[in-house]
Amino acid sequence: MGLRIKRTPAFTIKLFGRKQQCSALNVHLRDTRYEIRGTKCSKRIVGGYAPVPHSIRYIVSIQTTERQHVCGGSLINKYWVITAAHCDYSLTIYEGTEQEILPQHLVPHPEYNKTTNNNDIMLIKLKAPVDLSSYVSVALLPRQGAPIAEGRMCRVSGWGYTSPNTGLIPATLRTVKLPIVSARNCNSSESFDGGITDNMICAGYSTGGKDACKGDSGGPLVCEGRVYGVVSWGKGCADAQFPGVYTAVSKYRMWIDDTIFNYYTANGQM
């Protein structure tokens, strides 16, 4: 199967400098037609806190060209970003210093289903390499099929929206720690009632109160130092009995590796 690549128009990318509180990439989208994750929520990461500055160096913020935050993502090598497939729009990348880079292609998963949210994952190819430093680095990914145990504490991070109407990016990144919820509990009749596929994982508290929220889609759920989840969808934000739902990255490690390898092979760069 050939790569499903979408070409993007011209964009810019800048890397955070020393004065920024949180280092990351910011990817700008040209459209905000969707509201997948946490449409009823008016806050950013719910029940969270500001992390230590420069401690989350791989996180990406996807924004409109007017600098309005829409989605998150993770830098997985100098040329590639991983995010959610429902963040599938023309995009620009921005950060706080003078280095500028152009994104080149979007590669959504070919079997992404907008109705079920299954296979909600996408790769973004950048036109030039990111300059890695003590403020910007790449995220580690789990091996193919690697499980993550129920109850394991993980961390989801993002800027999210400060209100559902403005979508303004907060001054500081937010993060919250959440336990993994079993597929059996997440799929129970009291929760998502069978809506969770084998390609999804759930994280949150049965009592609610802590969760990813609107604007955090595509961002990383990090467990044991690796990105095990991509923020995908949910019911409201931090509602009791409804944990956040994430794309299970370990189900796609081979797809990620093969997509990147095949891209360079097809373009005669191997």
Image (cartoon, rainbow, N blue to C red):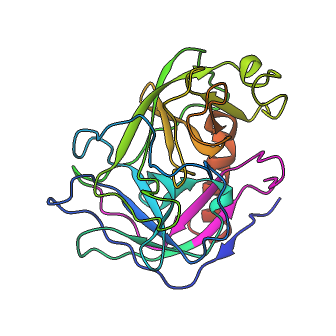
- Look at 46% across and 49% down and name the residue there: 43
- Look at 80% across and 55% down and name the residue there: 114
In the image, farthest residue toward the left: 19
The one nearer the camera, 95 or 123, is 95
Quadrant location of the N terminus in the rendered image: bottom right
- Look at 55% across and 32% down and name the residue there: 142
Q: In the drawing, does residue 40 fall left or right of residue 191? A: left
Magenta region: 105-132
The image quarter in which residue 265 lies: bottom right
Q: In the drawing, does residue 213 fall left or right of residue 247? A: left
Q: Does the magenta segment cover residue 207?
A: no
Against 72, residue 195 (above or below) is above
The image quarter in which residue 83 lies: bottom right
- Give the main secondary structure of the magenta stretch: loop
Instruction: Provide residue 94's location: percent of width, then percent of height.
Output: 37, 71
Instruction: Provide residue 247's location: percent of width, then percent of height.
Output: 66, 40
Against 242, residue 101 (above or below) is below
Q: In the drawing, does residue 235 fall left or right of residue 66? A: right
Q: In the drawing, does residue 1 fall left or right of residue 223? A: right
- Look at 79% across and 57% down and name the residue there: 110
The one nearer the camera, 81 or 193, is 193
Quadrant location of the C terminus in the rendered image: bottom right
Instruction: Provide residue 45's location: percent of width, then percent of height.
Output: 44, 43
In the image, farthest residue toward the bottom: 10
Q: How many marks?
A: 0
